[in-house]
Each structure stands twice: as C-alpha cells, then as structure tokens.
Amino acid sequence: MSLKNEPVLLGKLVATHGIKGQLRVAVYSGEFETILSLASLMLKGPDGRMETFQVAAAAVHGKKLILSLEEYDNINQSLPLVGHEVYVARNQLPALSEGEFYWSDLLGLRVETDHGEVLGELVDIIATGSNDVYVVKDGKREYLIPALEDIVLDVNLDAGIMKVSPPEGLLDL
C-alpha cells in the first residue's frame, strides 16, 4: 500500500471563532505543531471534493487550534467550511523517526495477536495524554489496545497489518 502521494488527514474544522473568519480545528493527533507550520492545506467537504487553501495564520488558543485562511476575513465566509476535514500533502509533513507513524496510516490496519488471532480493524485512535489507545473492531466486539511498545509488536504498513501482544485479560469479555 503506497502512501507517498496520499494526503494525510490532520483534523476537522469544528466551529468558527469570533466574527473575523477564524476557524476552530479539532486536531486528531493532539499535536498542533504540524498545522502551525503549514503555508497551505486542503479541505475536504461533505461532497468529497478537496480544495487547497492558503493559511493566513494559525495559533494555539488554550487547548484549541485557531486557523485563519487567506481571503476569509468574516464569519459569513468561513461558516460554510465548518465540518470540512483538514488534510495536508504528505510531502509537507516532517519526517518521522523509526517506529513512529501518522494516525492516518494506522487507521484501517488489520490487527492480529502474536498468536495469529485476528482481532479486527483499527478504526479509531484515542489520545489519552500518557499513551494513545487503538480502537479495534471486528463487527461484533470492540477492543481497546494501549499503544505501548511491549503491546504493539510490529506495524507493517505495506502488508496492512499490526501485530499486538495483548496483556492477560485484555481480550476477555
């Protein structure tokens, strides 16, 4: 699965901020640095159409990220953008260290135990502050897998598989 040219989902525009066209961004990774450094980004609307926008400014406001787009200087212009997903071209992202992955690359992976039992698909990631938690569903059950080195043994993006060694009791009903 080649990810080199795929845009990366960073978050979602969840509300306007004030009357000067600013937008509040829910950043999926919990880290604001990537969006703060962007000169442009892409927004994907409900119709699936992707459009590129120039970033006028981005700033952290408390625990929120506030974004201003070029040529959007009042609430009436920016309000229709609320609900759009925020993407970035992969080549705009910083390089990752060994063993680090972008959330968008992990979503959709098949999750298996180290004994070959298929647990399901990684469908969501929860940022908890201390470590992320992977939400894995198989249609009937949902598993919450802590994203810790001793539990997540291997991530193979090319094969689309994550191998985990769940601690005793984690998979019990």
Image (cartoon, rainbow, N blue to C red):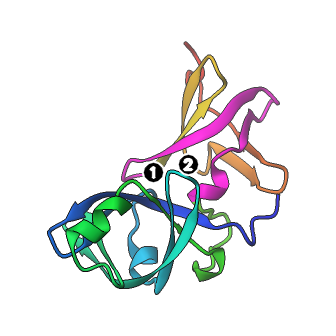
Magenta segment boundaries in residue numbering: 103-131
Left or right: 4 in relation to 36: right
Instruction: Residue 125: give x, y in percent of width and height.
Output: 51, 46
Give the number of the disc on residue 148: 2
Dot placed on the residue nearer the N-terminal end, 2 or 1: 1
Residue 17 drawn above or below residue 161: below
Amino acid, disc 2? Leu
Q: At 38% across and 70% down in the image, what residue appears?
A: 32
Q: Whole-percent x and y of residue 156? A: 78, 53
Q: Secondary structure at mark 2?
A: loop
Asked if the stretch drawn in magenta spans residue 122, the answer is yes
Q: Residue furthest front?
A: 76
- Horizontal side of residue 110 vs 34, given as left or right: right
In which quadrant is the C terminus drawn?
Answer: top right
Q: x%, y% of residue 36?
A: 38, 79
**Which quadrant holds residue 19?**
bottom left
Going by the numbered disc 1, the residue's amino acid type is Asn
* CA distance for labels 2 and 1: 7 Å
Q: Quadrant of the N terminus?
A: bottom right
Q: Is residue 37 above or below residue 164?
A: below
Say which mark, if any, is on residue 131: 1
Q: Quadrant of residue 59?
A: bottom left
| 23 on left or right of 134 | left
Indicate yes or no whether the magenta region holds residue 111.
Answer: yes
Q: Are marks 2 and 1 in contact (CB under 8 Å)?
A: yes
Q: Residues within 10 Å of mark 2 (few under 14, many from 20)?
A: few
Residue 66 disc label: none
Residue occupying the point 49% across, 57% down? 45
In this view, 124 is above or below 7: above
